[in-house]
């Protein structure tokens, strides 16, 4: 207790939360389970000055981010592009530059959208998602399903070819190309928006939001990172395999993307509908 505080008050977080548990015994029989969970989380955050939240919330955020990371990680154009770079004379430096640009783009876009989502506010006073936010998630699901349908219908007539502009790139130019591909890809943009909403809705502290963005970015960058890593480990062994992967991806990439986006679109659609019903 500090000078000037009324007798019986405390600033110690552990003591404040312990005393709040007494209040929970009074509301336990009156609250629905979900509302009681929000009361408990609110008391915990208040007791700690807003500096932390429950591990369960963090786990839920990471689980919600996982399908979104796949939408970025299995994007065929950057995978084909980085494999093409690995088959050039300046393979190592150019591929590392491309990977750096690709990763920076993911981190920057996701962080920006999390900040925007935090400023707008994704949750209502009760802790539930705001109705407009649920409509946005629903719209994202519809857009993802639309892209999936377009990819499926064009799988016989088109292919994800990478232009010959990647030949003999310097590391700086390769980084610029990776950054550009990560940002202008429409599918990536939808995944970044959805990830920003998920992280902002998670009732996380700033530090935990940083961890969530880092986990999302690392997993999302794996589609480009894995070919680069295996090439650096054993270039002679993996070069023909990467070339074979590129040869398979070019004619089949639209099928892969359409199936993946179908799953992600259904997930987003369900989250949006669930938010509107709750």
Image: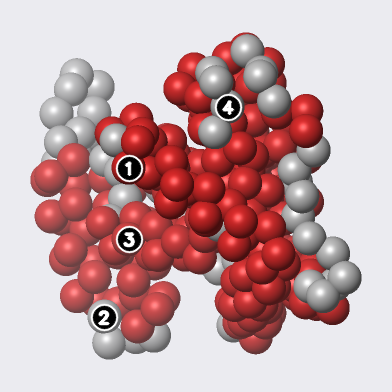
Q: Quadrant of residue 214?
A: top left
The CA distance from mark 3 to mark 4 is 41 Å
- Report whether 173 appears left or right of 11: right
Tell whether label 2 touches label 1 (CB within 8 Å): no
The quarter in which the N terminus is drawn is top left
Question: Mark 1 or 2 closer to N-term?
Answer: 2
CA gap, disc 1 to disc 2?
62 Å
Which callout, 3 or 1, points at the residue further toward the start of the chain? 3
Q: Which mark is residue 28?
A: 2
Dot 4 or dot 1, earlier in sequence = 4
Residue at 26% in and 80% down: 28
Disc 1 secondary structure class: helix
Q: Is residue 233 left or right of residue 19?
A: right
Q: Quadrant of residue 229?
A: top left
Quarter-of-image position of residue 266: bottom right
Front label number (2 vs 4)? 4
Residue 59 badge: 3
State the colouring used for the structure image.
secondary structure
Tell which tag, 3 or 4, sits nearer the viewer.
4
């Amino acid at each position: 207790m500090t000078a000037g505080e009324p007798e019986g008050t405390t600033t110690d977080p552990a003591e404040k939360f312990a005393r709040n548990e007494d209040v929970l015994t009074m509301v336990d029989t009156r609250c629905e389970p979900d509302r009681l969970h929000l009361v408990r989380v609110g008391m915990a955050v208040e007791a700690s000055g807003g500096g932390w939240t429950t591990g369960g919330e963090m786990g839920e955020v990471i689980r919600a981010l996982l399908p979104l990371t796949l939408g970025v990680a299995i994007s065929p154009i950057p995978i084909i592009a980085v494999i093409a770079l690995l088959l050039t004379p300046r393979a190592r430096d150019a591929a590392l530059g491309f990977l750096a640009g690709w990763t920076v783009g993911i981190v920057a876009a996701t962080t920006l959208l999390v900040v925007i989502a935090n400023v707008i506010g994704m949750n209502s006073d009760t802790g539930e998602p705001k109705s407009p936010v649920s409509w946005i998630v629903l719209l994202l699901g519809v857009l993802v399903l639309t892209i999936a349908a377009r990819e499926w219908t064009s799988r016989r007539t088109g292919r994800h070819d990478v232009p010959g502009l990647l030949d003999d790139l310097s590391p700086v130019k390769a980084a610029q190309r990776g950054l550009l591909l990560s940002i202008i890809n429409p599918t990536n943009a939808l995944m970044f928006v959805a990830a920003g909403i998920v992280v902002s809705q998670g009732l996380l502290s700033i530090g935990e939001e940083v961890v969530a963005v880092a986990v999302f970015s690392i997993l999302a960058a794996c589609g480009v990172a894995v070919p680069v890593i295996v090439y650096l480990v054993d270039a002679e062994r993996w070069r023909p395999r990467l070339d074979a992967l590129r040869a398979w991806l070019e004619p089949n990439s639209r099928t892969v993307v359409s199936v993946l986006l179908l799953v992600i679109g259904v997930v987003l659609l369900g989250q949006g509908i669930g938010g509107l019903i709750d």
